[in-house]
Image (cartoon, rainbow, N blue to C red):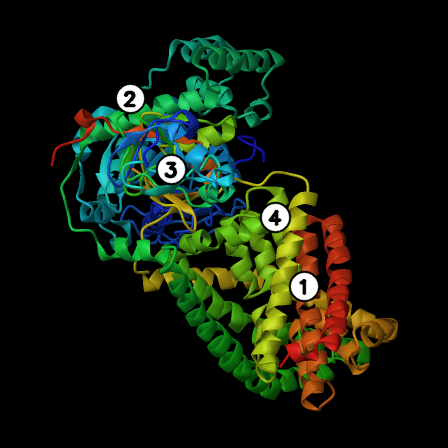
Amino acid sequence: MTAHAHSSATTIRCKLCGFAFDPAALACHTSCPLHQHCNVICCPNCGYQVVDEQRSQAAQWLARWWRPRKRQLAEGEQVALTDAPVGVETEICALLEDDPLRLARLSIYGLAPGCRVCLLQRHPSCIVRTGETELALSREIVAAIQVRAIARDDIPSA
Amino acid sequence: MPCHACPLIQIDPAQPPLVLIGNPNVGKSVIFGALTGRYAAVSNYPGTTIEVAYGTLQPNGHGNGRNNGHGDNIGQPNGQANCPVRHVIDTPGIQSITPFSDDERVTRDILLAHQPATVVQVVDAKNLPRGLLIALELAEAGVPFVLTLNMADEAAQRGIHVDTEKLAALLGVPVSSTVAIRHEGIQELIEQLGAARPATCRVAYPPAIEAAITDLLPHLPAAPLAPRALALMLLAGDDDLFECLDLSQTVRTLVQQGRADIQSALGHPAGYAINRQRLAQANALHALVTARTPVTPHWAAALGRWTVHPILGWPILAAVLYVVYLFVGVLGAGTLVDWLENVLFAQWINPVMTTLVAWLTPIPLIQDFLVGEYGLVTMALTYSLAIVLPIVGTFFIAFSILEDSGYLPRLAVMLDRAFRVMGLNGKAVLPMILGLGCDTMATMTTRILETRKERIQVTLLLALGVPCSAQLGVILGMLAGLGVGATSIWLGVVVGVLLLVGWLSAKVIPGKQSDFILELPPLRLPEARNIVLKTAARMEWYLKEAVPVFVAGTAVLFALDRLRLLEAIERGLSPLIVGWLGLPSEATAAFLIGFLRRDYGAAGLFNIARQGGLDPVQVVVSLVVITLFMPCVANLLMIVKEHGIRTALATSAVVFPLAFLVGGLLRWALVWMPGLIG
């Protein structure tokens, strides 16, 4: 399902049939005898079920360790570099970091707003590439780097 | 460290020295060697080259440099009588002239000490923006310099082409291109030295920074670096300069005010804001002079990715470590040690020396001191030259190959998570791996770690649970006879103790952990000449620094034996060894001698086991205890030398009781569950 906000006040589009519906308005949540602890959402059109992450403890725990990774960033979308798609060059828009020494060190390596960076891998350590330099960084540092997709007119043509 | 008040060598004022500056891993030391003919350590692991090397420049690029560092007369170049000597100084690799590390402080101090030094800035041709950051700092400092784009072949492989003439025009300094490892472009570089001049390129900072600079300029003293550069370094956070330049309280107040104003106006710390502006200018220059053409990726790039792959990286790591084990553990610790100890020393050197000493002096005390059971020749030199030297020699060869190939930082990446459990990060892999060769040497290498906390932590872990090659071979040989279960228990207990003590020490030892920011150089085929020369330089280092410590340790042993203290210590330890650990009384001597000479300890236990004196449980218990014991007296003395007597005592206070505690608990666990050994 693709959700736009918290599921209790969200219009959801079924991933299988594309039907858009409000899960709060589903009759199954009131008429079904199992509704009290039900943590799935059924599409009223095709019956396809997905887990309601707001109501499932297991889904919330799993999401901490295994989040669906983005394959590309939407224009204007800003994410932490740890959540950026692997192998895609992005532009640094902010460093959420207070330590002056760490900020100075990162800027020396070319990790500063306006510079381009590419996440190469997340495990066993985070590795990023900036220019022709590959750097292994702790996850904490990479998470503090906010990136966005490079605007189309900035991408050089082949 | 003193600044300009302490020149490192005596320099003729009429012949200012050449100072080589550059990022780590750009081939700076190779260029130094090409300019002077003297080898300096070349490494792909940033931060390894921390010593400063000196030499003399030859106009044809082949010099006769010597590293004495104490003002000795270096001498005239060959065949050129009465020719003025031009010194060349190789500095540690830096990211910035404004220092954030000890390496950068050394470089800054060299620039302050020698005026007007001519600088040769070595840049990695494929990483031009990072080199331009330093070039812009040199421009602000007003230091005459030339710039050389080294590793031009690697840049070409990646389709990167730099217009050196355009770059020279934009910077206002001579720019050349070199492939130093093949001596390409060196002569052109030497010919450009006479044209070195201060750069004309300038960075324009935001008004808040420019205002702070303007306020400071009238109050700064004359120095080898231009006042503008000093003002920027002060604003960026280089507080050492207050003492170095003996700056007044007025200046300190202006600097604090300037930093606050910049933070307020720009929303960022001053150092960061200054770097950002330089970075923007460096990127702009880079874009103007660099063109890229598409190329087929080099094989080394793919192999480099595999070595850090979350799945493929592990079998590659295991294979590398196995090959290292075969080379060091089997060839070095087996074949070479056997020949040196049992043939060269046992059959030739020791008998000859014993006869010679007996002939030279009739005094038994001196005879025993030199060639007795704990003699200088028969024990100290035999141990350090016949046992440890071949092991560290083969280890250094293997280590140099890992360094020069670029694999060592990748090893740090793969092991970073494991080290984090111990409150360290992957950068600690260097001394820990060296500890498998010789803990005494590895303790020295903790110097490269950035924070005191990390240096003490790694020193503790080395002393606690990293067996050196001399000991490891015997241990593995004894465990092999007992099977997989015994080996697993030994390994599991030792690794578990390391992880637990590492985790606890991270909580207890005060101080900060350094950031894990590690550059991964490209994989390269190592040059054989560099490997041989680097190994020779390190073995020279071992002979000068570690062998005297082994000699001192043997002297301690001799004194203890003469004063009959060895027997007393043995009697005192016996209840602990027999009662708590459940070992036979003969094992006491093995433990005691194991502290004083590490391989003897394991070998002593091996002899007892071979004679049927130890059952499988006792073998495992004794090996765990001897692994966790303080490595040897030489290591203890090295800890005193590197970290002081208090740290050495504190380390001993942790290691000795913990080794016996873990051994005793393991004994009781195995007595209850003997089936674990199998």
Q: Residue at x 52, y 26 (%)?
A: B238
Give a yes or no on whether discs 2 and 4 share a subunit. Answer: yes
Local packing at callout 3 (Cα closer than 10 Å; few below 14, some 14-19, many 20+) is many
Q: At numbered mark 3, what does the secondary structure look like: helix, strand or loop?
A: helix
Give a yes or no on whether discs 2 and 3 share a subunit. Answer: no
Q: Which residue is mark 2?
A: B201
The reply to whether residue B172 is visible in this rendering is no
Q: Which residue is mark 3?
A: A83
Q: Callout 4, which amino acid?
A: Arg
- Tell me, yes or no, whether the two marked residues, 1 and 2, touch with CB atoms within 8 Å: no
Q: Residue at x 23, y 57 (%)?
A: B299
> Which chain is mark 2 on?
B
- Tell me, yes or no, whether the two marked residues, 2 and 3, touch with CB atoms within 8 Å: no
Q: Residue at x 40, y 68 (%)?
A: B319
Q: Callout 3, which amino acid?
A: Asp
Give the spatial CA distance, label 1 vs label 2: 54 Å
Judge depth for marks 2 and 4 and give the one in front: 4
Image position, residue B533 (x, y; %): 40, 62
Q: At numbered mark 2, what does the secondary structure look like: helix, strand or loop?
A: loop
Give the spatial CA distance, label 2 vs label 3: 39 Å
Q: Which residue is mark 1?
A: B634
The quadrant in which residue B362 appears is: bottom right
Furthest residue in direction bottom, as rendered: B611
